[in-house]
Image (cartoon, grey):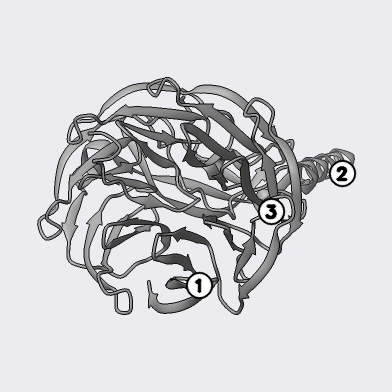
Amino acid sequence: MKTNYLFLFFALTIFYSCDNDDTDYEFVNVATAEVMSKSEFRKSVDIVAPQTIQVPGKIYAYNDFIFVNDVNKGVHIINNTNPENPKAIAYIKIPGNEDISVKDNYLYADSATDLLVFDISNIDTISLVERLEDVFTVYNYHTPREADAVNYSDFNYETDIIVGWTLKRERREKQDDVLIDFLFDGVALNNGTRAESNVGVGGSLARFQIVENYLYTVGHNEMSIFNIQNLSSPVLETTQGAGWNIETMFQADDYLYLGSTNGMYIYSLENPSAPEYVSDFTHWEGCDPVVVDGDYAYLTLRGGNLCGQQESVLEVIDISDKSLPTLAGRYTLENPYGLGIKEHTLFVCDGSSGLKLFNKENPLDIKLIKKFENIQSKDVIPLDDKLIMIGDNVLYQYNYVGNSINLISTYALK
């Protein structure tokens, strides 16, 4: 009998030890999707008085107005008639919003899976005039960067929208390492004349571009093309593949330049309703906005974190032969984001290292001519008479004076 008890004791000990062997388990941060039905989500759009900006995103300039995206929430409108004293005048609540474009007083905005059209001809009585439902199969889920795993169990792609996340630390069985960087880029798991037009200007981080009668939008791996000949009633003409990990889009001289985390893709607009792939320029993994001027493209690569493990640089790409882009120069930076061009000056937002100005009169040998330090810079829009920049929750405005640039004003966004 004593032997039987001893055997039972050892059996239970072995069972308990095996069941609690932590070598096959680990603690991970699990993000669980918070969802809202599409029907309720679509009722959330509203035009209200100025609000406090929560997380400033992209900027856009149109006439005397500056539009500031509040990431995933909506668009703040700032009257910039007097650049020395800009004033917030309205807020368009657009859940799931990332980008906008404006043409002839019609504002186009994404709202997760939908495209919305607003009439802003009277800024005091803005109205929603059209909604195209489910035209985007990809939108940014804003998955928490701290997440090691994602729980979509309560998410029905057909009927729901992800509006937030709950982060919880859980003990889970170890899994083989997998790449989950796509979660941060929003991949869905199921997958008039030029002379008469007045089109706004976005920064280099934009994913929307208007070219004559077409609105081009780009997501993680696809491009959607809308015919906007009837400005108040756009028509989705087609959706096509556009590369991989696409982050930005820039248009110049009847070409679209798509910045991805591993390169630049060039598309011809010879047939505007169906952009045709021409070529691509690949590099190591890095966050990558791009701007173009003449025969050269300028792009920044931000190394480290989710963007890659390489150094941060500015690259100059010779695109004189669109079918064969080649590297013409590379310059070390600290922590670059957006960039812009005004005549012979290249403006580079170098993150915590401030705003840097380069003379690019000779694109093969650009020279640093000035830098604004002790500020955080994220993206710029060079306009005819001034430069608009956003960074560290501040909107900066500068004017051009000869070959220099001087601060006009700063406007706190939070």
Earlier residue among tags 2 and 1: 2
Compared to 29, does 187 lie above or below?
A: above
Element class at badge 1:
loop
Quarter the N terminus occupies? top right
Compared to 407, does 219 lie above or below?
A: above
Amino acid type at image mark 1: Gly
Q: CA distance from mark 2 to mark 1?
A: 93 Å
At a point 26% along the width and 46% down the height, the residue shown is 198
Element class at badge 2:
helix
Query: Left or right: where does residue 20 sit relative to residue 163?
Result: right
Other residues around mark 3 within 10 Å, as few (<14) / some (14–19) / many (≥20): few
Amino acid type at image mark 2: Leu
Q: Which residue is mark 2?
A: 6
- Residue 183: image quadrant is top right
At a point 50% along the width and 32% down the height, the residue shown is 255
Query: Left or right: where does residue 258 sit relative to residue 19?
Result: left
Residue 336, position in %: x, y?
63, 59
Mark in front: 3 vs 2 = 3
Q: Which residue is mark 1?
A: 402
- Residue 139: image quadrant is top left
Is residue 138 visible in this depiction of the protein? yes
Residue 274, position in %: x, y?
42, 20
Q: Which residue is mark 3?
A: 362
Other residues around mark 1 within 10 Å, as few (<14) / some (14–19) / many (≥20): few
Amino acid type at image mark 3: Asn
